[in-house]
């Protein structure tokens, strides 16, 4: 009976509550009450979309990862901007990336990271969740791209989710 | 507002505007659908980020306290951009959009 009153995903609830406080322009009585209602209601409504609870083992590694991705976004943006403005034609490629991650949430974080860093977009995933199709805007060596993604993003994610 | 804040805001606005413009140029110049996918999702991320930062500096310099609600715009953008890029790519593969000849490898059958 008290099942309905609990917070099935405490982290999601905390993030929702904090987001609402930032959105509502200053913490007040009303925003706290509404924030609590949303933090309770939204996880209840979206419960069915999370077949298994995400398991972060090493959450404290996340900030380092986010900072690295942000830095890469800025650095790679310059190379993409240069490519757009330079007269030479880009050399695009479809790359099948062999996934070593197994957790669905970890894979979707990796896919999002690949899409966010300029020069690569994750286009599709195979039905057995073993291969990711990546479109690279300009590359000379497919293996180079696979190695770079593996060393920079997949390894830290594997450590986080092991 | 201090002159330093004004210079910082101007620089960030120019930087952000420049990157958004390059993204738009990329949309027109790149050869096929899949490469065009890169222009708006990428250059724009940095462009919007820089414009958002200038907004944070502006409102923080005008008022007394630091206002961080703009950062949420960027967070939401960073969360939704990969999903929309992925859906566009999947839709393109589904209807069999042609790739430029120099492309290495092939898109998957849907």
Image: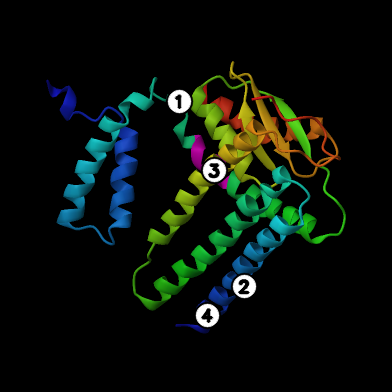
Subunit under mark 2: B
The residue under label 3 is B84
Q: Nearer the viewer, mark 2 or mark 4?
A: 2
Mark 4 burial class by Cα count in 10 Å: few <14, some 14-19, many 20+:
some
Name the image quarter holding residue A22: bottom left
Element class at badge 2: helix
Q: Are marks 2 and 4 on the same chain?
A: yes
In three-dimensional space, the C-alpha distance between marks 3 and 4, rounded to whole angstroms, equals 35 Å
Residue most extreme to the front: B95
In the rendered structure, find residue B14 and report the number of the disc placed on it. 2
The residue under label 1 is A57
Q: Are marks 1 and 2 on the same chain?
A: no
Q: Nearer the viewer, residue A73 or A56?
A: A73
Q: Nearer the viewer, residue A14 or A94?
A: A94
Residue most extreme to the left: A1
Q: In the displayed structure, would residue B104 be above or below residue B76? A: above
Name the image quarter holding residue B8: bottom right
Q: Residue at x 83, y 34 (%)?
A: B104
In three-dimensional space, the C-alpha distance between marks 2 and 3, rounded to whole angstroms, equals 27 Å
In three-dimensional space, the C-alpha distance between marks 1 and 4, rounded to whole angstroms, equals 44 Å
In three-dimensional space, the C-alpha distance between marks 1 and 2, rounded to whole angstroms, equals 42 Å
Mark 1 burial class by Cα count in 10 Å: few <14, some 14-19, many 20+:
few
Percent position of residue A34, x then y: 19, 48
Q: Are marks 2 and 3 on the same chain?
A: yes
Magenta residue span: A61-67
Q: Is residue B66 visible?
A: yes
Element class at badge 3: helix
Percent position of residue A45, x then y: 27, 32
Q: In the displayed structure, would residue B90 be above or below residue B15? A: above
Element class at badge 4: helix
The residue under label 4 is B6
Percent position of residue A85, x then y: 79, 61
């Amino acid at each position: 009976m008290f099942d309905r009153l609990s917070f099935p995903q405490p982290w999601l609830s905390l993030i929702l509550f904090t987001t609402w406080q930032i959105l509502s322009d200053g913490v007040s009585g009303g925003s706290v009450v509404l924030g609590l209602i949303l933090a309770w209601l939204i996880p209840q409504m979206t419960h069915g979309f999370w077949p298994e609870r995400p398991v972060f083992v090493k959450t404290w590694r996340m900030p380092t990862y986010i900072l690295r991705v942000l830095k890469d976004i800025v650095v790679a943006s310059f190379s993409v901007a240069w490519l757009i403005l330079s007269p030479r034609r880009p050399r695009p490629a479809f790359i099948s990336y062999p996934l070593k991650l197994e957790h669905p949430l970890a894979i979707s974080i990796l896919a999002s990271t690949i899409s966010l860093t300029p020069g690569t977009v994750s286009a599709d995933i195979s039905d057995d969740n073993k291969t990711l199709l990546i479109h690279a805007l300009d590359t000379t060596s497919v293996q180079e791209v696979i190695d770079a993604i593996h060393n920079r993003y997949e390894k830290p994610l594997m450590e986080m989710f092991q | 507002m201090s002159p330093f804040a004004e210079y910082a805001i101007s620089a960030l606005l120019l930087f952000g505007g420049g990157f958004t413009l390059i993204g738009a140029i990329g949309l027109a110049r790149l050869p096929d659908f899949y490469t065009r996918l890169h222009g708006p999702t990428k250059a724009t991320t940095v462009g919007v980020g820089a414009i958002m930062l200038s907004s944070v500096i502006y409102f923080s310099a005008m008022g007394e306290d630091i206002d961080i609600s703009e950062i949420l715009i960027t967070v939401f953008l960073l969360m939704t951009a990969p999903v929309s890029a992925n859906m566009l790519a999947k839709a393109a593969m589904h209807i069999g959009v042609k790739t430029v000849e120099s492309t290495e490898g092939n898109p998957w059958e849907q």
